[in-house]
Image: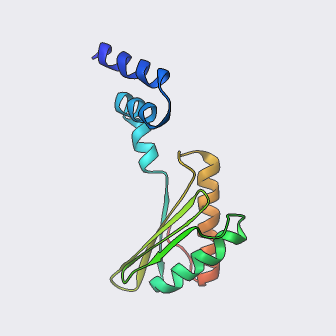
Amino acid sequence: MKTTTCALLLAALLSGGCFGAVAVGAAGGVAAAKYVKNQEVREYRTTLRAAYDAALAVLPELGFPTASAATLGPTEAKVKAGDAKVGMAQFPGGVVRVAVSVGTFETDDNRRRALLVHERLAARLGVPAAP
């Protein structure tokens, strides 16, 4: 086990890019989980269209560039602006689950910025976000 871990860590140090991140994640487990879970999720009592329109509006207000990719489907929507991604899904009972991620890795600053997006979304929608 120690040999495999050392080999993976050595490969991560000697190589760049995605392989390094994957190797460190495979060796440590925690790094891979944090990369995947780099998002703040809240639920709002609203329509999918209202949440989508709100996301398009609040991202530039917070200094993110105009959305470079935005899709609205019947039950899901996505908006990407700079390093911010907002994913939305409609659930029964008039609930929309919104997942916001900023940046690639889970850092205090990325979490702070994601929480600011949720704060603005809640204000624009006129509904509180469930924590």
Residue found 41% across the figure and 33% down from its top: 19
Q: Give the camera-side residue of 98 and 104.
A: 104
Q: Is residue 46 visible?
A: no
Instruction: Using residue 104 as the reference point, say whether residue 59 is left or right of it.
Output: right
Please give left or right for residue 45 compared with residue 107 in the image: left
Judging from the image, the colouring scheme is: rainbow
Q: Quadrant of the N terminus?
A: top left
Residue 87, x across and y down, in percent? 46, 68
Q: Quadrant of residue 64?
A: bottom right
Q: Residue 122 is drawn in which quadrant?
A: bottom right
Query: Residue 89's spot in the image, x, y percent?
Result: 40, 74
Q: Is residue 39 above or below residue 28?
A: below
| 30 is higher (above) or lower (below) than 44 | above
Disc tally is 0
Residue at image coords 64%, 58%: 113
Front residue of 34/71: it is 71
Instruction: Residue 125 in the image: state x and y as whole percent.
Output: 59, 83
In this view, 24 is above or below 107:
above
Q: Which residue lies furthest to the left in this view?
A: 1
x then y, percent, for residue 129: 53, 73
Residue 16 appears in the rendering? yes
Residue at (64%, 55%) from the top-left corner? 112
Q: Where, by quadrant of the figure, is residue 54 drawn?
A: bottom right
* 79 lies above or below 39: below
